[in-house]
Amino acid sequence: MKVLTQKDLLEILPFGRTKLNELLMSNVLPVTKIGRDYITTEERLNEWIQENIGREIKY
């Protein structure tokens, strides 16, 4: 299992730091908050993307 950090998410997802932070703080992405940091797994992120294909994400 590979754990992804915020830095990893910035490299993987097609948007910038501001948008990523908005999504993280609005609990849209499947992440766990540890202190000020957010982590997820590569598997869970892929599942979330598959579950949301074709949907509009509002936050």
Image: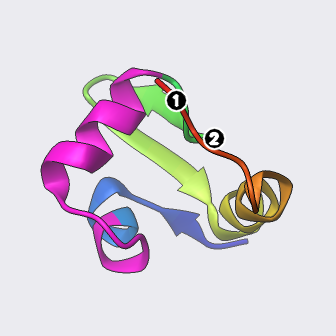
- 57 or 26, which is in the foreground? 57
Residue 37 highlighted magenta (yes or no): no
Q: Which residue is mark 1?
A: 58
The image quadrant of residue 17 is: bottom left
Q: Residue at x 45, y 28 (%)?
A: 33
Q: Position of residue 8 (x, y in %)?
A: 36, 70
- 3 or 56, which is in the foreground? 56
Q: Residue at x 39, y 64 (%)?
A: 9
Q: Is residue 5 left or right of residue 50?
A: left
Range of magenta residues: 10-26
Q: Is residue 30 left or right of residue 55?
A: left
Number of disc labels: 2
Q: Is residue 49 above or below residue 24?
A: below
Secondary structure mostly seen in magenta is helix
Q: Which residue lies most toward the bottom here?
A: 11
Of badges 1 and 2, the one in the foreground is: 1
Q: Is residue 15 above or below residue 21?
A: below
- 28 or 6, which is in the foreground? 28
Which class describes the residues within 10 Å of circle 1: few (<14), some (14-19), or many (20+)?
A: few
Nearer-N-terminus badge (1/2): 2
> Hey, what amino acid is under mark 2?
Pro
Between the C-alphas of marks 1 and 2, the distance is 15 Å
- Classify mark 1: helix, strand or loop: loop
Q: Which residue is mark 2?
A: 30
Assign the N terminus to one quadrant of the image.
bottom right
Q: Position of residue 24 (x, y in %)?
A: 39, 34
Q: Is residue 3 left or right of residue 38?
A: right
- 2 or 8, which is in the foreground? 8
